[in-house]
Image (tube, coloured by chain):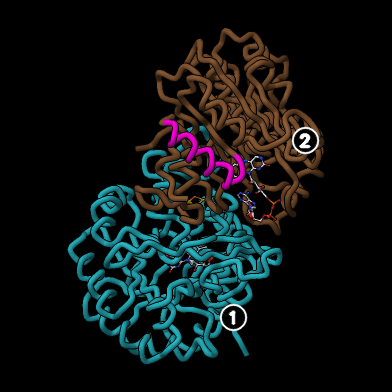
Chain colours: A brown, B cyan
Amino acid sequence: MMSLSGPRLETATILEHELIARQTWRLRMAAPAIAAAVEPGQFVHLRLPGRPDHILRRPFSVYDVGPGWLECLYQVVGAGTAALSTTASGGSVDLLGPIGHGWQPPHDTRRALLVGGGLGIAPLYLLAQRLAGPDVSVTTGTLSTTDTPSTSDASSATLTSALAPPPLSPAWFSGVTVEAVLGVQTVAALFGEADFTAVVGAANLTVTTDDGSYGRHGLTTDVVQERLVELGIDYIACCGPEPMQRRVAELAAAAGVACQVSLERRMACGLGACLTCVVETHAGWRRSCVDGPVFAAPEVIW
Amino acid sequence: MTVDLSVQLGDWSWRNPFTVASGTFAAGRPYADLWSQTATTGSADSLALSQAAPLSCLGALTTKGVSRQPWLGNTGLRMTETASGMLNSIGLQNPGVEAFCRDDLPWLARQQVPVIVNVSGHSEADYVAVIERLEQEPAVSAYELNISCPNVDCGGMSFGVDPVAAGRITALSRAATDRPLIVKLTPNVTDITVIARAVEAAGADALSLINTVAGLAIDRRRRQLVFERGVAGLSGPAIKPIALYAVARCHQAVNLPLIGMGGISQVEDVVDFILAGATAVAVGTATFTDPLTVPRLIRDLGQWCQDQGVTSLSELVGVAQLP
Ligand SMILES: Cc1cc2nc3c(=O)[nH]c(=O)nc-3n(C[C@H](O)[C@H](O)[C@H](O)COP(=O)(O)OP(=O)(O)OC[C@H]3O[C@@H](n4cnc5c(N)ncnc54)[C@H](O)[C@@H]3O)c2cc1C
Ligand SMILES: Cc1cc2nc3c(=O)[nH]c(=O)nc-3n(C[C@H](O)[C@H](O)[C@H](O)COP(=O)(O)O)c2cc1C
Ligand code: FES
């Protein structure tokens, strides 16, 4: 079985690299082959440029894609991300991707609740776009930006796919109401509000801060609890700190609502070979890189 | 000038000196897809990869450790990066020899590559049972006895630090097969040549040098050890000098072909291992950094030989001798 849809290697040129919130960077890269294949919830395994002493790649969710490019948002938490943040636009990074099983909402989803904590917000934006469907003008707007993909490193084979529209077009869903809850510690760490507002609408977006400096004072899980009581939510997608995911999973289970979580594990290979990234599930150890990172919440043994 | 990269491990010839380090390549499937795709898109020029059988570029493929029964592996965090290296505590997680024969071997048999099965166990009987089961499988070419893993409590490295135990397990395995028998040694001993000699005397055909180096990591914030078992195994460029030393010493001490490994990521590393006494080499951690490392090294070694006027790798083996 030689699938052509699996992860591939691509040398990507950095198109934009800017600080968007406290310690949080937006990294847009020209990577036509990977961008054309990304599904919501998948990630790329990025080799830190210019740092051969850091031998392992770093996994980052794909936040957004467009023709020929993809974007990751990342927070500086250690040596690798600190080094990455000093790489200038025009530089190149070596990507492996797209990797993993992304979000798979039930086909009859009518009202979805996306819950992101901190950088766990990142893998939810493509999902929001996909669920909200093509009739949301901003979604298509995002996809038809005028960025031209960098062609320097791409072979002609990958270029052809770069010119084709990204496969976000067949919306899996339409007419799904999407609500999002984005939680950050404090207002200085907030990002993505405008993006999500444009896709889900202001009325369907709640921002929470732990310190009350913006939006609603409190935790995302408080909001989830309320929403589960009030509305006919039939799908929850959650990514963030593990205690938060666990709590959301419990709330969803109690309410009988389908719930998926995206789990973070340390990863060496990112291809399913090394078994460093395993998650304990009711079906035994699963590799979070290729069997996940998105898992059905009831399967996970927390 | 044509460069012949083929090498002889005793009676066994390989098309080139490269294999993959056990546990870093699963049974090959995760990389077959990627290598095949590279062959199709031509995105990495001049790598001689076949689309239909991409793993056939290897001299041999070494599998993840296979045990008699399924092993769950270790709980808790399994990996951390270190300066130019990584520590792992996988604990030889594997589904057991029956699942291996059922799920991996039929596929491996079609990959046109000799298969070395890495064998692990908690007891002598475990090792022998795995070999006996695999003797029924024509797709298996050779065995590599892992008596050197620091990440399991019972068995593993405890056999490899004692010359008597290492000799016994080699002799029992030898009695169970006529296929090439490779024994993989640990650097975590005072004198590796003592173990190497014991294993040679017991009938091993080759040695793999080295398994990971025992190491520790500390979680400063929580003021405790990072890994539940405490000890973990260090691999990657950080261990190359340790591995080279083990190869040079064993080259001096025994008359067996050596498969060198530990931190190989560039063609210069491959040459160093051969000069120190290795006939073949294995690449592990570097494949995590760049999944195309091995195909690149095959290409680069051919180029290096051409540039240096080397017509056969055998002229280089062990040329740089310890005093
Ligand atoms: C599937 C997946 C998607 C992710 N998506 C994002 C994202 O979109 N944005 C973002 O900011 N972060 C994301 N992360 C976390 C990100 O990979 C880590 O923050 C990053 O690897 C830290 O690297 P460092 O060198 O700065 O930290 P260090 O602590 O110095 O790294 C040491 C080692 O630990 C690993 N590591 C450290 N923290 C994590 C972590 N939380 N998860 C996995 N490995 C870790 C590193 O990769 C490295 O191997 C994701 C992780 C996974 C598994
Ligand atoms: C994640 C990981 C898993 C490993 N699993 C095994 C194993 O199952 N059996 C074994 O004999 N060695 C195992 N090893 C050791 C390697 O085969 C090799 O000896 C070691 O990593 C040194 O080579 P390297 O620096 O090129 O990785 C493992 C190493 C790593 C990093
Ligand atoms: S990171 Fe290697 S198996 Fe998942």
Q: Is residue B257 visible?
A: no
Segment colored magenta: A240-255
Residue A2 to residue B231: above or below: above
Quadrant of residue A194 in the image? top right
- Return the chain for callout 1: B
Residue B165 to residue B247: above or below: below
Q: Is residue B233 magenta?
A: no
| Residue annotated with mark 2 | A212
Residue A167 is left or right of residue B57, and the answer is right
- The secondary element bearing badge 1 is classed as helix
**Residue at point 35%, 64% (across, down):** B71
| Residue annotated with mark 1 | B245
Percent position (x, y) of residue A48? 70, 48
Q: Amino acid at mark 2?
A: Gly
Percent position (x, y) of residue B172? 25, 82
Pointer 1 residue Cβ closer than 8 Å to ligand 2: no
**Which residue is nearer to you in this view: A292 or A36?**
A292
Quadrant in which the C terminus of chain B is drawn: bottom right
Residue B33 is left or right of residue B297, and the answer is left
